[in-house]
Image: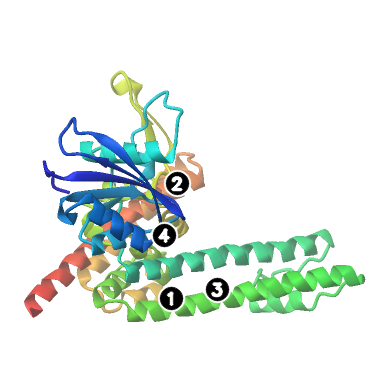
């Protein structure tokens, strides 16, 4: 956001029921004062904006959190420039052990005026609705996994083993699970409850998958184009592509692939001191988008195999421009070779998969940005 010597900077410490407000007056040494606490209600926010003066002269910010972006949308509707900032990147003063809503609001206003806060990307309401749907599907997948584990562990405790060669949770396995009977009524009741819950979660996941199909079909053409192009990559089917697109938003907002990798939290932590010999790297930072990082790690395991274009992958690539296919093939060749090389050096497969996921995101950035630029060019020509 451009600097304005006459702007007043408003810090908002937002909670479910209340908002603590502080304002930093213009100028480096301008006064920073608390304006008290208001209810977290649209009418109270409207009165606050009116009280603070001309909306065009206000610059408001608050921390990203469980209250979402409703306040952002309300303030922008009133004409107030607002940013949602990353809480983990707010400067922390050593030795400061006093934390109150009033002090937090004042700190936000002061740091915002000084330009020390990092804003996060805010989706529009339609984009957030799609993202919530994808995250709901992720939650359903976790619930299904837990429900299945309860069934399998009960069977294991009772010495029930499926026929040799039968894979878990295939149609035949579901049928075998449903035929199991136990002597004691109490045990049969709890087993039936576990199986019913597993079947319920399976059906729930199927319904959410269908809902994602419908939502993608109804999404803007530009969004559908990016989702389809990402599926040209090995290990990236629709669910993964939609997850990445809904979490990233626009790939073009990242100038370099490394910036997107940092956003995912899949980059190594680093401690540097005293010159080249004092540099050490540790585990990944995880200070990024966990939803995106999870699906990237799942996709990364596909690159342990030799490069190949399966029937399913060929179908996903159908209709894509040759440049996108070339990038996808380049990703296969590079990442597959890198996986084998790192494992050959004795690296743990889990760490190798993390490294592959990080590089895979770079190829996604290349494809996503290219498709976005192509869409913008086509829109300009059509206009």
Query: How many residues crowd mark 2 within 10 Å: few (<14), some (14–19), many (20+)?
Result: many
- CA–CA distance between discs 3 and 4? 31 Å
At horizontal 33% and vertical 64% (from top left) the residue drawn is 245
- CA–CA distance between discs 1 and 4? 31 Å
Horizontally, residue 32 falls left or right of residue 186, namely left
Front position among marks 3 and 4? 3
Q: Front-most of 362 and 289?
A: 289
Q: Quadrant of the image for the C terminus?
A: bottom left
- CA–CA distance between discs 2 and 1? 31 Å
Instruction: Please tell me whether residue 64 is drawn above or below residue 187 in the rendered image.
Output: above
Q: Position of residue 311 (x, y in %)?
A: 40, 76
Q: Mark 3 = which residue?
A: 205
* N-term-proximal mark, 3 vs 4: 3
Q: Front-most of 1 and 199?
A: 1
Q: Position of residue 181 (x, y in %)?
A: 85, 75
Q: Does residue 294 appear anywhere in the picture?
A: yes
- CA–CA distance between discs 2 and 3? 30 Å
| Numbered badge on residue 212 | 1
* N-term-proximal mark, 4 vs 2: 4
Q: Mark 2 = which residue?
A: 352
Where residue 327 sits, quadrant-wise, is bottom left
- CA–CA distance between discs 3 and 1? 11 Å
| Numbered badge on residue 306 | 4
Horizontally, residue 276 falls left or right of residue 196, namely left
């Amino acid at each position: 956001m451009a600097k304005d010597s006459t702007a007043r900077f408003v810090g908002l410490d937002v909670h479910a029921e209340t908002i603590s407000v502080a304002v930093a007056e213009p100028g480096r040494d301008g006064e920073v004062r608390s304006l008290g606490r208001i209810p977290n209600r649209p009418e109270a926010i409207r009165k606050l904006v009116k009280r603070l003066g001309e909306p065009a002269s206000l610059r408001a910010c608050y921390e990203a959190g469980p209250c979402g972006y409703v306040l952002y949308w309300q303030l922008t509707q009133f004409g107030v420039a607002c940013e949602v900032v990353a809480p983990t990147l707010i400067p922390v003063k050593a030795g400061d052990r006093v934390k109150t809503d009033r002090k937090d609001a004042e700190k936000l206003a002061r740091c915002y005026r000084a330009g020390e806060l990092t804003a996060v990307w805010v989706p529009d309401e339609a984009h957030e609705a799609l993202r919530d749907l994808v995250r709901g599907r992720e939650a359903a997948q976790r619930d299904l996994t837990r429900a299945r584990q309860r069934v399998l562990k009960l069977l294991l405790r009772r010495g029930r083993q499926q026929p040799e060669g039968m894979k878990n949770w295939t149609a035949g396995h579901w049928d075998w699970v449903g035929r199991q009977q136990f002597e004691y009524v109490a045990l049969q009741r709890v087993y039936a409850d576990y199986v019913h819950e597993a079947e319920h979660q399976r059906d729930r996941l199927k319904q959410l998958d269908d809902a994602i199909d419908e939502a993608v079909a109804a999404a803007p053409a530009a969004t559908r184009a990016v989702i389809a192009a990402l599926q040209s990559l090995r290990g990236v089917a629709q669910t993964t592509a939609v997850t990445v697109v809904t979490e990233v938003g626009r790939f073009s907002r990242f100038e370099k692939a490394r910036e997107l990798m940092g956003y995912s939290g899949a980059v190594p932590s680093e401690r540097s001191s005293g010159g080249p010999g004092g540099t050490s790297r540790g585990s990944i930072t995880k200070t990024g988008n966990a939803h995106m990082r999870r699906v990237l790690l799942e996709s990364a395991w596909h690159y342990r195999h030799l490069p190949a274009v399966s029937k399913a992958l060929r179908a996903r690539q159908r209709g894509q421009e040759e440049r996108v296919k070339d990038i996808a093939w380049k990703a296969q060749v590079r990442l597959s070779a890198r996986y084998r090389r790192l494992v050959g050096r004795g690296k743990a497969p889990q760490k190798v998969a993390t490294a592959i996921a990080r590089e895979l995101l770079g190829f996604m950035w290349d494809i996503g940005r290219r498709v976005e630029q192509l869409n913008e060019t086509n829109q300009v020509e059509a206009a």
